[in-house]
Amino acid sequence: MEWENIVIGSGPTGVACAVALLAQGRRVLMVDAGQHLEPEREARLVQLGGSDPQGWWGPGGEWLREGMEGAVEGIPLKLAYGSDFPYRTLPGATRVQGEDVNTKFSLGKGGLSAVWGAAVMPYRQHDLTDWPVTAAEMAEHYRAVLEFMPVAQGVDGLEQEFPTLKPSQPMPLSAQAAAMLADLEKNAAGLRSKGVSFGRSRLAVNASRCVRCGLCMYGCPHRLIYSSAQTVDVLRANPNFAYAPGLVAQRVTESGDRATVEVLRTDGEWETFTASRVFVAAGVLPSTALLLRSLGVYGKAVTLKESHYFLLPMLRLKSVPGFSRRELHTLAQLFVEVMDESLSPYTVHLQTYTYNDLFEQPIRKMLGPLGFTFPWQAFLSRLFLFQGYLHSDHSPLTRAVLEREGEGDVLRLKAQQRPETAGILKRLVGKLSSVGGMTGLRPLSMLMRRGEPGRGFHTGASFPMSARPQGLESDVLGRPAGLRRVHVVDSSVIPSVPATTITFTTMANAHRIGTLAAREGLG
């Protein structure tokens, strides 16, 4: 079947690329595995969303929280409305075997945006020294993404290094976050002189309708947390757009002025689509395997880079009056950016979380019988969880090799730790301790937990963009290994992974590639 442009994948980068192509008057077919929430859960979600939020924590909403539990290392597997549909496999899906690697990919409609934390921040130029694209060049594409993805964000102390581009109503702060922010603002000048900036979190959420139910981690009953599946549904009203779910891409090839995608349908049958251009947005693991298979590259390693993920509990010296376990949202409340050359030449990004019920589970397990007499209210009102990320230059690497196995193949992953990672984290804890008089917080360093490689899902760079690509590297339009009509638009082509959140920038980059390909008559 002939098409003008084919986009593989419905995750955030896939929809950003499709939006860009459609804006230039191009016709787009999106092929996608398209797993979705089970119909019975969908029906219960609609019913729950239409009911009184006061009852959502009661028996009628228990199903929403099924299967989710907290651990000292974080949430082992984040579900969507009690369902694991984002992680389910299908015939033809990439087979992955990992050694000391903990990462996942999604065949769900919307990809991993069905279960993400919705945090969005741009990258600053200081963190993009190895990119062939500048932050200034990305600005118009960040703005374009903000036209279809709602982001709750205000102008504050982060604006100088991380401009909002389109300010809007920020999410309401919990009592804990408001108290912490007040402490920080009293000492803003002193903290900035120490290389510490802060502000309210920026979240891909429709803040105007938030009822502060405290269920964000399980899935918003009003679906206010953005998923790119929402944009797919909007685009389906466009006559130049078609969505084809139930298809798993197996191979992409070029011949003359056409590119071909071979897919395996859920019924086990093969189908072929042909277009002027193909844009690959299947996610870093499926895209890497797809490209290696298509190029016939077996047994040769490519390197995945990541922004290393860690959790650091911190304790506020004062308890918080009016602390509530219910009247709040449970996504990130505040962002703290550490920009200190003596610590790292790059930004260290920290997302601050205040109470949610998943906090209590691992603490109760650790305390055992002592939990019955423990002063929970006072302790939880002082407890803050910092979820942090490092630049990929200070983070573990993962070696990925596609190997033939039987009649198919398998993508084998092996982690490679970097010795400097532990040192930077130790210096970070020291830094946070040294400014404790200004923040009112003390790090609980003994409870810090580092994620396994891949655990933070901020991974990419298997086919990195370069101004002068060599080998399997990509050009600035995401075309790897000399390909002309196949563009990779997901995180596979970013040269490095700065600490501030990955999704917003990969969406902007996908929009940039789609826009330029269409403007230059390449689509």
Image (cartoon, rainbow, N blue to C red):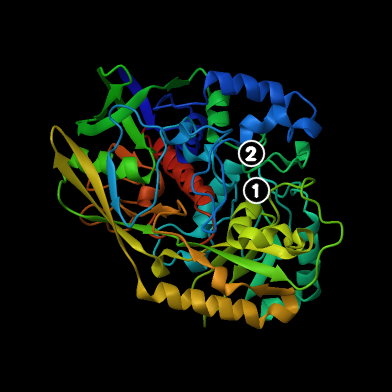
Disc 1 secondary structure class: loop
Res 191 → quadrant: bottom right
Assess disc 2: are there few (<14), some (14-19) or many (≥20) residues with their C-alpha within 10 Å of its C-alpha.
many
Question: What residue is pinned by disc 1?
Answer: 203
Residue type, mark 1 in image: Leu
Give the mark nearest the N terminus, 1 or 2: 1
Say whether residue 25 is left or right of residue 419: right
Label 2 secondary element: loop
The residue lying at 39 percent from left, 27 percent from top is 33
Q: Residue at x 36, y 50 (%)?
A: 493
Label tally: 2
Which mark is drawn over residue 225? 2
- Do labels 1 and 2 touch, CB within 8 Å? yes
Amino acid at the residue labelled 2: Ile
In the image, 481: left or right of 28?
A: left
Q: Where 16 falls versus 76 (above or below)?
A: above
Whether residue 327 is visible: yes
Residue situated in front as seen by the camera: 102 or 298: 102
The outermost residue toward the front is 369
Where does residue 214 sit, x and y in percent of width and height? 72, 43
